[in-house]
Image: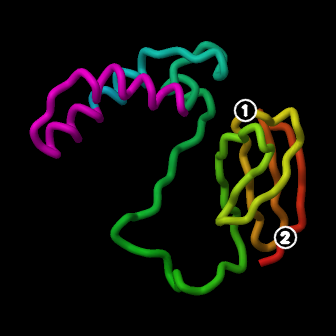
């Protein structure tokens, strides 16, 4: 993620002069499309982001930005919430202001934290491997 942000800054934001939000939006989407169809990453088997997503045979789902979920103020009773976090040298994972220790092999790696609301568990994984599971009471 950080590498992409640096690349985006150097290759697009730092080079292209824009005078409106529309120019920024259109240029950013065009850059993102070029990047996702041409740049290959070793972390995803030398594939481009588009090819990696296609090989997963899953469809990305996004919430409707115009319609909040029903009873959005109620605490959820079921569902899973996923977070991707870069683990720094302090070996701490921060979720909603709560800090959890993680195994040393996660230092400077991205971890996926999943809160299972019904089971009241927080699982931390890396590259599909379960690294830690914690009771997570709301």
Q: Secondary structure at mark 1?
A: loop
For marks 1 and 2, the one nearer the N-term is: 1
Residue lying at the far left in this picture: please name it: 19
Residue at 24% from the left image edge and 21% from the top image edge: 15
Query: What is the span of residues highlighted in magenta in the rendered image?
Result: 1-29
Q: Is residue 25 magenta?
A: yes
The answer to whether 131 appears left or right of 44 in the picture is right
- For marks 1 and 2, give the one nearer the viewer: 1
Total numbered circles: 2
The answer to whether 31 appears left or right of 108 in the picture is left
Q: In which quadrant of the rendered image does the N terminus lie? A: top right
- Closer to the camera, 1 or 9? 9
User: Where does the image place residue 69, in percent across and percent down from the top left?
Assistant: 49, 76
Is disc 2 surrounded by few (<14), some (14 to 19) or many (20+) residues within 10 Å?
Answer: some
Placement of 56 over or under 85, stated as above or below: above
Splitting the image into 4 quarters, where does residue 117 fall?
A: bottom right
Q: Secondary structure at mark 2?
A: loop
Residue 108's label in the rendered image is 1
Placement of 114 over or under 47, stated as above or below: below
| Residue underneath mark 2 | 119
- Closer to the camera, 71 or 12? 12
- Closer to the camera, 12 or 58? 12
User: Where does the image place residue 97, in percent across and percent down from the top left?
Assistant: 67, 65
């Amino acid at each position: 993620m950080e590498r992409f942000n640096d690349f985006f800054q150097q290759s697009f934001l730092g080079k292209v002069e824009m005078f409106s939000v529309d120019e920024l939006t259109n240029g950013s989407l065009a850059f993102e499309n070029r990047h996702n169809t041409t740049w290959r990453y070793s972390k995803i088997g030398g594939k481009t982001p588009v090819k990696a997503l296609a090989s997963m045979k899953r469809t990305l789902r996004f919430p409707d930005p115009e319609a909040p979920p029903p009873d959005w103020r109620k605490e959820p009773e079921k569902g899973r919430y996923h977070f991707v976090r870069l683990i720094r040298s302090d070996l701490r994972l921060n979720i909603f202001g709560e800090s959890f220790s993680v195994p040393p092999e996660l230092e400077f790696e991205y971890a996926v934290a999943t809160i299972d609301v019904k089971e009241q568990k927080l699982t931390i994984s890396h590259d599909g491997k379960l690294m830690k599971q914690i009771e997570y009471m709301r």
